[in-house]
Amino acid sequence: MRHPAPGWWSAVRGTRRAILGLSPRTSLARARRATTAVEFAICALAMALIVVGFVEFGRLVWTFEVLQEVASEGARCMGLGANSCASAGVYSSANTKNYVVSLATSRGVVINAAMILLNNVATCGGASGFSQISISYDFTTVAPALLTSLGSGFTVPVSACFPNHS
């Protein structure tokens, strides 16, 4: 059994509480505020990771859509023999690659000619006589330390066909 504190100790404890402003209610309020701060820190970190993940996934989808659109327009340019993809009315792979690179760059995705594969006598969907463009783009995240799964990059492959105009 615990012995009660002598009378003088109770007086000292009461005086200390009075001077420092400590009371059981104050201590409980401080503990609750500290717990709230710790919980917020843990939740804020998780929410920040989720937000960054959503933003990066959005960038990945946007990049795919832009590259798919660029490949489709490039294949159409090749298939129709447009001036942007031809030289003196004849198909030119150099002009086509320059056209595709300029399209992608103007839409915010920087690619180079080495990422582009052209085929002006392709078979698409079992039918022959198509122009085909394939682009292989290495997507890199802006937050590699946070998103380790995308830290080393992710290859975005796109391909498009258009029938050759005779």
Image (cartoon, rainbow, N blue to C red):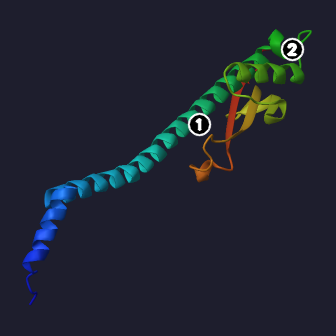
The amino acid beneath tag 2 is Ala
Where's residue 129, x and y in %?
A: 78, 26
Q: Residue 40 in the image: state x and y as whole percent.
A: 35, 49
Residue assigned mark 1 = 60
- Report x, y in % for residue 124: 71, 32
Q: Is residue 119 left or right of residue 11?
A: right
Quadrant of the rendered image containing residue 65: top right
Secondary structure of residue under mark 2: strand
Q: Is residue 150 visible?
A: yes
Residue at 29% in and 56% down: 35
Q: Nearer the viewer, residue 151 or 6?
A: 6
Viewer-nearest of labels 1 and 2? 1
Q: Is residue 3 depicted above or below 111 in this figure?
A: below
Q: Residue at x 43, y 50 (%)?
A: 46
- Asked if residue 87 is positioned above or below residue 66 in the image, the reply reads above
Q: Secondary structure at mark 1?
A: helix
**Alpha carbons under labels 1 and 2: distance apart:** 32 Å
The N terminus appears in which quarter of the rendering? bottom left
Task: Answer with mark 1 or mark 2, whichever residue precedes in sequence.
Answer: 1
Residue projecting furthest to the right: 88
